[in-house]
Image (cartoon, rainbow, N blue to C red):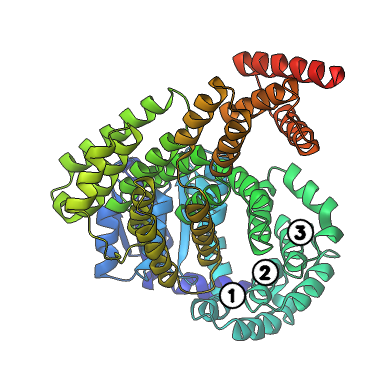
Amino acid sequence: MEEVEKNTLAQLDQLNVLVIDDNLLVHSILKESLFALGIKEVRCVQNAYYGIRLCDEMYFHIIICAFNVKSDKDGFHLLEELKFRGHVKKTTVLIFLSTETNESLVNSIIELQPDDFWTKPLAINKVRTRFIAILKIKQVLFNINSAIDKKSYAKALYYADRHLNNETLAQYHPNINRIKGESYLALRDFAEAEKFYSQLFKQYKYSWVYLGYAKALLKQGRLDEISDMIKTLIDKPDTRFGAHDMMAQYFIEQEEYEQAYEEIKKAMALAPRNIERNKKSWDLARLTHDHKGQYVATRNIAQQAKNSIHDSPELILNVIRSGIDLACATPDESANEILQQTDRYIRQFEHDRHDANLFKQQLIVVKARLHNVRNERDKATKLVENHMSLQPSSVVEDNLDRVKVLHELGMREDAIDLLEAINNQIAGDSLNSQVVRRYIAQESEQREEIHFTAKELNSMAVEHFQKNRLLPALDAIKQALKLSPSNLKLLFSQLKILIKIKQEEQDIPDHIVLAEGIIAMLSSQNLEGKSLVAFDDLLIKWQKVTSEG
C-alpha cells in the first residue's frame, strides 16, 4: 500500500490536468491544491469549446469538469465528444463537479461512470485526499483499463484475475470485480457472468452486483427467475434507472415493443440527456403508434443534442415531420395548434440556417404534407408533381416522409416502391436496426391496407354515422385506430357507434367483444374532467342497451 502511494506521488509532476469550469474560484482552489501536490501542468478553461481545443493540442491524464458548463454544452455532451475524439479513455482520470445532486443529474453522471463526483463548494483539504485516492485506484487498474480501451476483454479478465490473487490489492478488489463482470457481459459469456455475479453476492451488496446478475440472466431469457429481484431494483432509488434501462433492452430483444416503450419512458424520465436512448424512445413510439410520444421524443432529441456531436439540421426536420404525423392522427381541433407550432419550426429553420437551400426537397415534402392535412389537396399535389423528386435519398427519414406524402395524395404505387428502397437501406443487426426494420415493415403493410390518415378516416366515420350508415362508420374508425390506437376521441367514437349498432339490432357477437375491449382499455386509463364524464355517459348507455338485449 505504501509503495502504491509512493509511486503515485512520484509521478505527479509528470501528469497533465485540465479543469473545465466557468467559475474562476474553482480554478483557483484546484490549482492551489494540485500545485501543492507537486503537479506542474494544470490548464484551466471556462467553457467546453476551449476545453476541446486544448485536448486537440495536448494529452491530459486527468480531466476535472463541471457537469453544468452554462456557456455552451453540459458535461454529459462534452464527455461524449471527448470520448468520440479519443481524448477520454478508461485510463483517463475523469472527475465531475456540480453544485446539484438531483436524481436526474446523478443518474446521468452514473451512466458516464466518472472516477469521482465532487460537490461544490470545494474544500482544499478534501481535494487532496480524494485526488490521491483516485490516482491510486487508476494506477492499480491501468493494465485492465488499457485492455478495455482496446476492447480486449479476455486480456482484461487475465489482468483482473492476477490482481485478485494479490492480497496487497484487497482494497481494490471491488473495483476489479466490477470490471471483470462487465468484461464477461461484453464477451457475451452470460453463463459465466451469472456464475461470477452469484459468487459476488457472498462478498458484496453493491447495486452493480445485482444489476449485473440480473442482466446475465435476462440475456439468457430467464426473466421469471428474477422477477422479484427486478421489482426490488425498480423500487430502490440507486438502481431504478439501471433496472428500467435494462428491462427496455430486454423487451426490445424479445420484440415486446409495448413493454419496451413503457420501460424506456421511465428510464428517460430519470436520465433525459442520453441521445441514443431518446432515439430508441422515438423508434418505439413509432412502433406503438404513439404519435404524441413521437413528437415529444423528437423535440427532446433536438433540445438535448443542441451543441453536441449529435446536433444536426435533420433533428429539427424530424420535429416538423412528427408534428405533421401527430396532426394527421389527431381527429379534433387540437390539431390546429400542432400545425401552427409546426409552421413556426419551418419558418425558424429557413431563417436560422444559411444552408436551408440544401434541404429544399425535405421542405417541399413537409409543406406538401401541411397543405394536405389542411385539406388543400390541390396545392399539395402541385408541389409534389412539379418539385418533388421520386429518387430515394441517402437518408431514411427523408424517404419515409416522401412515402407519407405520396400515400396521402393517393400515389400508392410510388409510395410502395419507395418503401422497398428504404428497406434496402437499413443494414446491420443492431437493436436500432431491428426496431426501424420492424417499423418499415409495419408501414408497408398499413400503407397497402389503409389509404387515408386517421383524421380523414374519422371524418368519414362521422359522415357515415350521421347518415346512419353504421357498419361503414365502424369500419372507418377501426382503420383509424390501427393508425392511432390510443386516441381517446377515436375510442369514444367507436364505442358510440357500437352502442348505436346495438340499439338498431345490427350487432353480431364480435361487436360485444369489441365494445368490452374498449371499455376495459378506457377503464385502465386515468381519465379525468370531460373525458371521464364522457366515458361514464357512454358506459351507462352501453349497459342499458346490453341489458335490454
Quadrant housing residue 50: bottom left
The residues bearing labels 1 and 2 have C-alpha atoms spaced at a distance of 8 Å
- Image point (69%, 52%), residue name: 243
Tag shown at residue 41: none
323 up-or-down from 306: above or below: above
Judge by depth and name the residue closer to the eye, 376 or 65: 376
Q: Earlier in the sequence, mark 3 or mark 2?
A: 2
- 511 on left or right of 124: right
Q: Which residue is mark 3?
A: 210
202 up-or-down from 33: above or below: below
- 173 on left or right of 426: right
- Label 3 close to label 2 by CB (< 8 Å): no
Q: Amino acid at mark 1?
A: Val
- Label 1 close to label 2 by CB (< 8 Å): yes
Q: Which residue is mark 2?
A: 172
Q: Which residue is mark 1?
A: 140
